[in-house]
Every structure is written in structure tokens, then in C-alpha cells.
């Protein structure tokens, strides 16, 4: 996201924050972002420069697209959290549900316990399902009232599926 | 009847509140058309030709009399006094106003009903045998398993935004009446070494690319049913095509990967999930089973006088033969109420009929009924001693047409009269065929014959699996009809060499006989097909579908197009006289 675009509001730990994170697109002359701001880098960038990126002052986040295989983040079957600020999963359009399965796999199979953020077409109406699938951080898209998104975690207070937790209602 | 536990009611009530808020935001301009579309579809709300269409879930086709009364109330208050039963055992209203829908859903919630996941790219209402729970040939009662799947699939957080819609059918009986071979997943109960499990078919479906399901696992023990479904859905959610909605159903993935590779992928995923938290326990199944009310059958349901009445009343005799079905309990029968009377759109029912049927269900069938995927209603538990009385009442209501299993028991979608997607009308074609075959003696002589009509290639009228299938197509802005032969939803006994690839779980996809027909020709074409069958059959016992399987479609095709040629020649001649 370029700085000129309207920034999304971030929900983290059920609090609203300004979203300072930007998507990095590598070019031939600029394969890596500068170590000065909060950057989300594509999976390919992370994989090619993992060692270098892990040593940064401001750790980067990895951005997975819906077609990315989250297992490619893992080394020996688990994701090593060292120097990785967060994992973000992109929903280019909210009807593309692959990100839900990606989140589930990151949480239950690949050992990711750090911050897991839903970005892109993230709406009041999707955060409940996203939270149940393992996301704990949400970049709410412009036009959707973040306060209402906070309340939407409590849309359903029970669930049938045993292996997907019901999100706690708003804390604090 | 399944009785809600507190969590069921809580979730349905919370859904009403959620949808009320979404509708409010949409009407206020806070939610865009695009953002609202999928949300409303997940509540069964379409924007149709004349008005929104609201599809209400009837889980696995099971309906209580008080629920039918609520549907009647909704039909009167918010619609035009009638409703339509769909082939997914659901009810559709064609005339509600968008702003009324939250109130309609609130009214439904009072009687443990909803419209959750009746549309959208999610897991739809699980369907089953209309005689589930009372059929004499049952291995397990599929209702319990359907309810388990209903719970598991309701608001499933991972599978709410699949590449495309997803339909599951369960058959618990030896004879498949749930059409498991033409579903995204078909589950057929089987017994192995005294343990129950499910044979799993995947990748069946109608629509633009009709395919029969492929057997991907011959036996999944019941404990592992949900983890196995979860594995299939995850493979599909991650790998099903999203670039082209016509290639997005799981059938395309199964076909492109090959069934074997698909099955291996599922197996690999399943190994991670097997024995995990979604594993089904005996306690859970027991708890669900106990929430279904036990039918208090009479120890002595009275003398069965139906044969005697049939001897005196040939109209009753016909109905008794066609519209009553064997029951597992001695002295009882299941009864089909035909919603296929000539002149009434197939599956339609008025609010007054709904109220009357609800009263009859209370008096004759313990207040319960089923919706069949053939768009009829079934009273599952009628004492045979009361069949004659019930028939007289149904006859008064116009619900005793003795045509179950016959050609006039047409499955049809609402078609171009209502549906924005349709290329052509279905209802007037169904009516023309019904009028052509209004002679009951002739219908009985023809015997069993499934005739299905779809107004477009989305195939809501299941034409691909009709013994005779009729499909509305658009040719340069005009309505034309393509005819298929040899489709069936189940029961194919022996694979035939020429159509082996088109079979699975006993289902078969019909084959197109040739160029399409004008609307006014369709009834004549059906008549010719029937005459051809009667000439070719070796006895009354050989049914239409048996003859098609024995001789293939060529003799039918030859005669239909020869007669069409003659008719055209005669027209030309007449014009010259």
C-alpha cells in the first residue's frame, strides 16, 4: 500500500491502532526494503533473504497471498519465529476463502504462535470467522467502521466446530 | 423431529441480529452492493427477475406442522400467498421485500427455522432420502448423520467462502433415494464387520458440466466422518479453481487431478486430522439421536382396510398403489402428497394448502412431514387403517394426484417465469406435458418414468438425471429445448460399455438425442419417446429406463426426428393446398 492511499485501521489485541505497515514490492534495483519502517514482504523475498531479514532492527512481516503455500515458511516442518514480526495473509477479495485455510494451517500445523494478520478485503462481516480460523490481528478495510468491527467479534457466542475457538468478546 | 438444543437457538437468533444489521447497513449505504451480495446469499436471498427470492432451509427435508404454519403465515404476510418447494428440499418465496427479510427470519427463528447457507459458495443444506427414519431397507437412520453434518457445516469458519457452492447428500438405506452420485459429496452408509461407515463419492454434480461422483473412499468409519469431510473441504478450498466460476465446483478439481490423485491428497490431509478434536464420539451421536422426538407408534394401529376400500374405489386404488410406500413399522405407511397436479407449477403450494396440510399432519402423521427432492411432501407415519380417510381429505385439497414415479411427477425449476438466470420457461412446458398425459390409465400403462425440466444449464430441475430430461436453451434470443435420454439419479445396475464413464454410485447422466425443439413441439416429442418405448419393451416389467439402457438412444432418436420431418412436410403440404 502506498502512503497516499487511505490507511486501514488495525485491530490488535482487540484495540484499535493506526496501521503503519506497508507492502513491499521488490524491484531489480531494490530487492529489499530499507530497515527503517514497518514492511510486509512477499514470501519470495523472505525465502531468498531470510537470514539477512532476521537480523533487522525493525523486523519485517511476511505477506502471504491466497495462492501461497504456507508450508514454504517452515524449516523442518515448523516456522522459526526469530526476527519475524508477523505473518499477514492477504484477502484480495473477501469471497476468496483460501486465507482461512492458510491461517488454520499456520496455527495448527506449522507452529506459528506469533501475530497473524488478515489484510486486504477485511470487513466487519468477516472478522469473526477470521478470528476463529486463527487470526489475531486485522487490517480493517476503509469504509468499514472499526468500532463496529470490534463488536463483531461477538456476533456469535457459541460454535459447533470443536477445533476452531470462539473469539472472546471485546476485552477492556 | 429434531428439537433445538439451546446452542442451536442461540446461533439462529444471533444470525437474525447479524443479518438485520447487515441489511440496515446496506439500506443506509454503509455496505456496498458488492460487499452485501455474498452476505445476503449466505442467507438465501437472491435478487431475482421480479423481486428478491428468499430460500428457507428445511434441514434434510424434515418439517413440523407448526413450521409449515409459519411458512403459510409468511406467504400471506410478506409474499403472495404461496411458496415453492425446491429440489434441495427447501422452500422458496418469490416476492418478499428486501427490508422485510430480517423480520421474516425472526419469525422463522421462533419455530426453529432459518435460511442459513441456502445459497452462496458454502456448504448447503444436506439432503437425504425422503423416507429417512421409516424406510424398511435402512442400514442407519441418516437423519442423525445429516444433523451432525448440519451442525458441523453451520458457520464453519474455514469453509464459508469456498470456490463454489457445496452440496452433500446422505443415504442410509440399501436403495439410494438421495442421489448420492450427483452431489459434491455423496455418503452412502455401509456396514463392515458389524461397524457402520460411509462410502464416500466426490465430484458429482449437474450444471454445465454434469459428472457423476467418483468413489474416493469405500469405507470411512463413522467416528472419522467429520475429519474426513474436513480433509476434503480443505483440499477443495485451497485448490479448487477460483479463476472461472464455471470450473469452480469440486467436480472439476476431481476430474483435473484424477479421482485417484484427489483421493490421495485427501488421504494425506486426513492423516493430520484423523483422531483429532472433530472425531465423532458415540456420546455425541447419542445426544443428537435423542433430540429427535421418538414417534409414538400405536401398538395396534387398527385394521388395515385399504385393500377393501381399493376394491370398491378405483381412484383410491390408484393412489394407494402410487402414493403410499412401505414402512418399517407394521401397520404404518409413508404417504406422498403430490404437488404435481396439472396446471399447478411443480412444487408450488398455497398458504391455504399449507395450513390444511399442517392440520392433516397433526391428525394423521404425528405432526411431521418431509419435503422430497422431487418437490412433493411426504407424511412419514400414517396408520394404514387411516389411509382411506386421509386420501379423501387430500383429494379435496388437490393433493392426491396418483402420479408418484410417473411421467407427470415432473421435477421442474421455476424457470424463466421467475428466475433471472433462465433461458426459457419450465412451468408452461411441464403443464403442456401433463395435459398431454392426463389419461391416468395410459400413465399407469407407461409405468415408472422420471421427467425433469431445467430452464437453463444451471440444472436446478435436474434434467441430466431425468429418464427424459428437458433443458431450456437460448438460440438467438428464442426459447428452445434440448432433450436428453437415459439419465437417472440412482439404481443403475450394470455398467454399459458406451456410457461407463458417465456412471457413479448408480447415477447416470442423460445423453442429448439431437437438435433442440421449439416449445410447442416438446409434448409431442415426449409422446413419441413414450410410444417408442411401449413398442420396444419386452413386457410391462421392463421400464422406460431399462429399455433405454438395453437398446441405447438411437431407436428413440430416429423415430423422434423422422416424425418431426413428417410433421414439417405435412405443414408445408397443408400450406400449399
Image: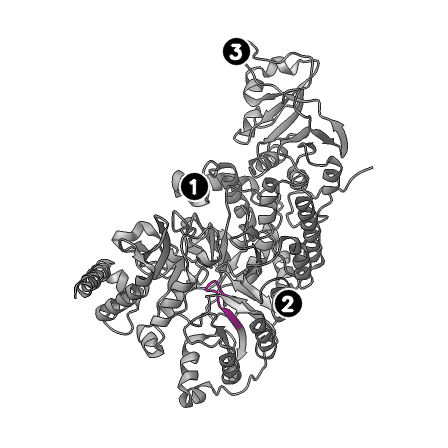
Residue annotated with mark 1: B247
Q: Where residue B60 appears, x then y in whole percent?
A: 54, 61
Answer whether residue B565 is visible to the viewer in this image: yes
Q: Where residue A12 appears, x then y in whole percent?
A: 74, 31
Q: Nearer the viewer, mark 2 or mark 1?
A: 2
Figure quadrant of the C terminus of chain B: bottom left
Asked if residue A15 lies left or right of residue B383, the reply is: right
- Residue A47 lies in magenta, yes or no? no
Q: Which residues are magenta?
A: B372-379
| Circle number at residue B73 | 2
Dominant SS type (magenta): loop
At 54% from the left edge and 52% from the top edge, which residue is drawn? B124
Residue annotated with mark 3: A28
Q: Nearer the viewer, mark 2 or mark 3?
A: 2
At 50% from the left edge and 66% from the top edge, which residue is drawn? B348
Chain of the residue under the numbered disc 3 shown in the image: A
Chain of the residue under the numbered disc 2 shown in the image: B
Callout 1 secondary element? helix
Callout 2 secondary element? helix
When asked about the image quadrant of residue B125, the answer is bottom right
When asked about the image quadrant of residue B91, the answer is bottom right
Label 3: few (<14), some or many (≥20) within 10 Å?
Answer: few
Tell me whether the residue at label 2 lies in contact with that at label 3, contact meaning CB atoms closer than 8 angstroms. Answer: no
Amino acid at each position: 500500500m502506498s502512503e497516499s492511499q487511505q490507511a486501514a485501521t488495525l485491530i490488535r489485541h482487540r484495540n484499535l491502532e493506526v496501521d503503519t505497515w506497508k507492502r513491499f514490492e521488490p524491484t531489480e534495483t531494490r530487492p529489499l526494503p530499507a530497515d527503517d519502517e514497518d514492511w510486509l514482504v512477499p514470501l519470495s523475498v523472505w525465502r531468498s533473504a531470510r537470514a539477512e531479514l532476521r537480523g533487522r532492527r525493525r523486523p519485517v512481516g511476511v505477506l502471504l497471498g491466497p495462492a501461497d503455500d504456507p508450508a514454504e515458511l517452515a524449516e523442518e516442518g515448523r516456522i522459526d519465529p526469530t526476527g519475524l514480526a508477523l505473518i499477514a495473509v492477504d484477502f484480495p477479495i473477501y469471497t476468496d476463502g483460501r486465507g482461512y485455510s492458510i491461517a488454520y494451517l499456520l496455527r495448527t500445523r506449522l507452529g506459528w504462535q506469533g501475530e497473524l494478520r488478515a489484510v486486504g478485503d477485511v470487513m466487519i462481516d468477516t472478522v469473526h470467522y477470521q478470528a476463529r480460523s486463527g487470526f489475531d490481528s486485522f487490517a480493517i478495510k476503509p469504509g468499514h467502521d472499526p468500532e463496529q468491527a470490534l463488536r463483531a467479534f461477538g456476533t456469535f457466542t457459541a460454535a459447533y466446530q470443536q477445533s476452531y475457538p470462539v473469539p472472546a468478546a471485546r476485552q477492556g | 423431529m429434531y428439537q433445538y438444543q439451546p446452542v442451536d437457538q442461540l446461533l439462529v437468533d444471533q444470525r437474525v441480529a447479524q443479518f438485520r444489521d447487515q441489511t440496515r447497513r446496506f439500506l443506509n449505504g454503509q455496505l456496498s452492493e458488492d460487499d452485501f451480495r455474498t452476505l445476503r446469499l449466505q442467507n438465501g436471498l437472491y435478487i431475482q427477475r421480479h423481486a428478491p427470492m428468499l430460500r428457507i432451509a428445511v434441514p434434510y427435508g424434515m418439517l413440523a406442522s407448526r413450521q409449515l404454519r409459519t411458512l403459510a403465515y409468511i406467504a400471506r404476510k410478506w409474499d403472495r400467498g404461496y411458496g415453492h418447494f425446491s429440489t434441495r428440499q427447501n422452500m422458496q418465496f418469490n416476492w418478499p421485500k428486501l427490508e422485510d427479510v430480517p423480520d421474516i427470519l425472526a419469525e422463522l427463528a421462533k419455530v426453529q427455522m432459518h435460511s442459513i447457507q441456502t445459497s452462496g459458495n458454502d456448504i448447503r443444506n444436506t439432503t437425504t432420502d425422503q423416507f429417512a427414519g421409516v424406510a424398511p431397507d435402512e442400514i442407519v437412520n441418516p437423519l442423525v448423520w445429516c444433523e451432525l453434518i448440519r451442525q458441523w457445516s453451520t458457520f464453519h469458519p474455514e469453509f464459508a467462502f469456498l470456490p463454489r457452492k457445496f452440496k452433500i447428500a446422505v443415504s442410509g438405506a440399501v436403495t439410494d433415494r438421495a442421489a448420492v452420485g450427483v452431489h459434491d459429496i455423496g455418503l452412502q452408509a455401509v456396514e463392515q464387520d458389524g461397524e457402520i461407515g460411509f462410502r464416500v463419492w466426490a465430484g458429482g454434480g449437474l450444471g454445465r458440466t454434469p459428472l457423476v461422483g467418483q468413489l474416493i473412499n469405500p469405507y470411512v468409519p463413522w467416528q472419522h466422518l467429520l475429519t474426513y469431510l474436513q480433509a476434503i473441504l480443505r483440499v477443495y478450498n485451497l485448490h479448487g479453481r477460483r479463476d472461472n466460476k464455471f470450473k469452480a465446483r469440486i467436480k472439476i478439481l476431481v476430474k483435473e487431478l484424477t479421482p485417484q490423485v484427489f483421493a490421495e491428497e485427501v488421504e494425506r490431509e486426513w492423516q493430520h486430522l484423523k483422531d483429532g478434536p472433530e472425531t465423532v464420539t458415540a456420546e455425541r451421536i447419542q445426544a443428537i439421536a435423542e433430540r429427535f422426538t421418538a414417534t409414538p407408534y400405536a401398538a395396534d394401529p387398527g385394521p388395515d382396510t385399504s385393500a377393501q376400500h381399493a376394491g370398491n374405489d378405483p381412484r383410491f386404488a390408484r393412489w394407494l398403489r402410487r402414493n403410499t410406500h412401505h414402512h418399517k413399522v407394521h401397520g404404518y405407511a409413508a404417504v406422498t402428497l403430490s404437488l404435481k397436479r396439472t396446471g399447478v407449477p411443480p412444487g408450488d403450494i398455497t398458504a391455504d394448502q399449507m395450513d390444511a396440510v399442517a392440520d392433516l399432519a397433526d391428525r394423521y402423521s404425528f405432526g411431521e412431514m418431509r419435503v422430497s427432492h422431487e418437490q412433493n411432501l411426504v407424511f412419514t407415519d400414517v396408520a394404514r387403517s387411516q389411509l382411506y380417510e386421509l386420501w379423501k381429505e387430500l383429494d379435496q385439497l388437490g393433493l392426491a394426484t396418483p402420479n408418484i414415479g410417473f411421467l407427470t411427477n415432473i421435477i421442474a425449476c421455476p424457470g424463466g417465469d421467475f428466475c433471472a438466470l433462465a433461458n426459457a420457461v419450465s412451468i408452461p412446458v411441464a403443464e403442456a406435458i401433463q395435459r398431454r398425459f392426463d389419461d391416468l390409465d395410459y400413465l399407469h400403462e407407461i409405468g415408472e418414468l422420471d421427467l425433469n425440466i431445467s430452464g437453463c444449464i444451471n440444472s436446478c430441475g435436474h434434467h441430466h438425471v431425468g429418464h427424459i430430461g428437458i433443458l431450456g436453451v437460448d438460440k438467438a434470443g428464442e426459447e428452445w429445448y434440448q432433450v436428453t435420454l437415459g439419465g437417472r439419479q440412482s439404481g443403475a445396475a450394470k455398467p454399459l460399455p458406451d456410457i461407463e464413464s458417465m456412471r457413479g454410485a448408480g447415477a447416470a447422466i442423460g445423453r442429448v438425442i439431437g437438435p433442440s425443439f421449439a416449445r410447442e413441439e416438446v409434448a409431442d416429442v415426449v409422446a413419441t419417446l413414450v410410444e417408442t418405448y411401449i413398442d420396444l419393451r419386452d413386457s410391462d416389467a421392463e421400464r422406460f429406463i431399462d429399455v433405454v439402457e438395453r437398446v441405447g438412444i438411437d431407436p428413440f432418436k430416429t423415430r423422434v426426428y423422422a416424425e418431426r420431418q413428417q410433421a414439417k412436410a405435412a405443414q408445408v403440404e397443408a400450406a400449399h393446398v
